[in-house]
Amino acid sequence: MGDRERNKKRLLELLQAAGTGNAHCADCGAADPDWASYKLGIFICLSCSGIHRNFPDISRVKSLRLDFWDDAIVEFMTHNGNLRVKAKYEARVPAFYYVPQANDYLVLKEQWIRAKYERQEFMADGKTIPLPGNREGFLWKRGKDKAQFLRRKFVLLAREGLLKYYDKEKSKDPKAVISIKDLNATFQTEKIGNPHGLQITYRREGHTRNLFVYHESGKLVPLITRNYRKQGFMEKTGPKQREAFKKRWFALDSQERMLLYYKKPLDAFEQGQVFLGCKEQGYEIYEDLPKGIRGNRWKAGFTIVTPERRFVFTCPSEKEQREWLESLRDILSSPLTPLNHLNSARYCQKVLLPVHLTFLCRSRLPLASRAAEPCSPSALCASFLYVLSLGLHQQRVAAAAGDPWAEELVGHWPLRPPGGKEPVPPQRWLSPGVPCSQQPPLAVNQG
């Protein structure tokens, strides 16, 4: 037995002890945890303590301030603590695994806690988890064109790494086959209006496809990769900034560096996307709106400047404006990964090249209906090569910044100035501060 007040004081001192990690919940990171698992030796928050109560064979919890602690248990807590226990139970957490945060939903925290302590999936010398077999079941999926949710069969092929779903229960051919490596799943209970709602996102034919599903009992354990950095309604205007502002739903994917926008939150496909490079590539974000531009209903706003154009947005409140600015600035200040460079190239191919081709066909090429002579094949080829050089803008910027991956990629397309004999050094490929569409054309080596 021990002195109640003395042991309480020791526990509160352990909570703030440097180098222990005890000042934040061992499972979700919430600050100032008031509870502890005296069987595991960790300090946890009230929310996570409720989950620990569900498996008493593994974990037992007490309040730091309200319950009685004897000397032996306090000594056990002293010799363990959050960082030591995390080193044991989180030794090999996969890089793609989404670790729940304090404000995440309870079902996310429960699966994380059970994976750590009950199934011991992440211990360095823990149990060998056999590969799961195929799983088959029914989810309620929202129709792409209609708002109602319909019962659909889903099949998970774990070894092949595929997720399939079928329009009809006895159908032989799936409606869609999704590679798990290209899939992202996040809990979206408020958006879907169900406590077990899930948003599955994947790429299809150059677009971002969303599936909105829910399970009746909530016994759905998806592969969680990441949450969107921020979501919400904003208004945006068109490329000339003279078009009317329209209300759209926005989702910021920090991993892909994409700002996606939809007409409604539950739309299957995005209406458009904005790739977010870094400051060295000419991407900037400015608080407030350009001079002379005003939104419809909302006054607070910001402007994203890319090498191609300005995107102007208004927010419902100044608080929303600050949150969007903070999230976007974090992304613009971070360096691009090789995957980001690839996404940038795809964005140029999908969005920028058609724009420049249209521009050239309308204003540069001597079309038969607008000129005395029809456009020659050589002129068309030369114009296309001009457009191709513009499409390589992102790779050139990255190579100029010394990115070896980008230099290797661009190395397959030696760029020369018109009439030039030697390749232009990377540092001189672009004029600083000049949009891509205003850069001088670069001839592509056709050899």
Image (cartoon, rainbow, N blue to C red):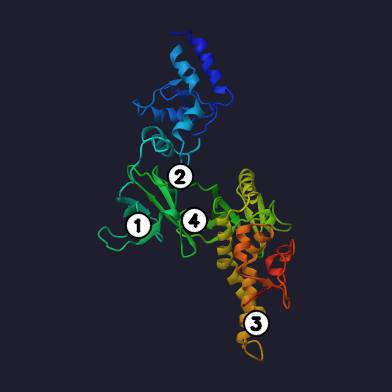
Rate crowding at label 1 as few (under 14), some (14 to 19) or many (20 or more) other CA atoms within 10 Å. Answer: some
- Dot 1: element: strand
Give the position of the N terminus as an image quadrant. top left
| For the residues bearing labels 2 and 1, Cβ distance under 8 angstroms | no
- Dot 4: element: loop
- Of the two numbered discs 3 and 2 on the same chain, state the one appearing first in sequence: 2
Confirm whether residue 278 shows in the render.
yes
According to the image, label 1 marks what residue?
A: 164
According to the image, label 2 marks what residue?
A: 190
Residue 365, disc: 3
- Of the two numbered discs 2 and 1 on the same chain, state the one appearing first in sequence: 1
Q: Please provide percent x and percent y for residue 110.
A: 40, 36
According to the image, label 4 marks what residue?
A: 264
Viewer-side label of 2, 1: 1
Callout 1, which amino acid? Lys
- Dot 3: element: loop
**Disc 1 and disc 4: Cα gap in Å?**
25 Å
**Disc 3 and disc 4: Cα gap in Å?**
39 Å
- Of the two numbered discs 1 and 4 on the same chain, state the one appearing first in sequence: 1
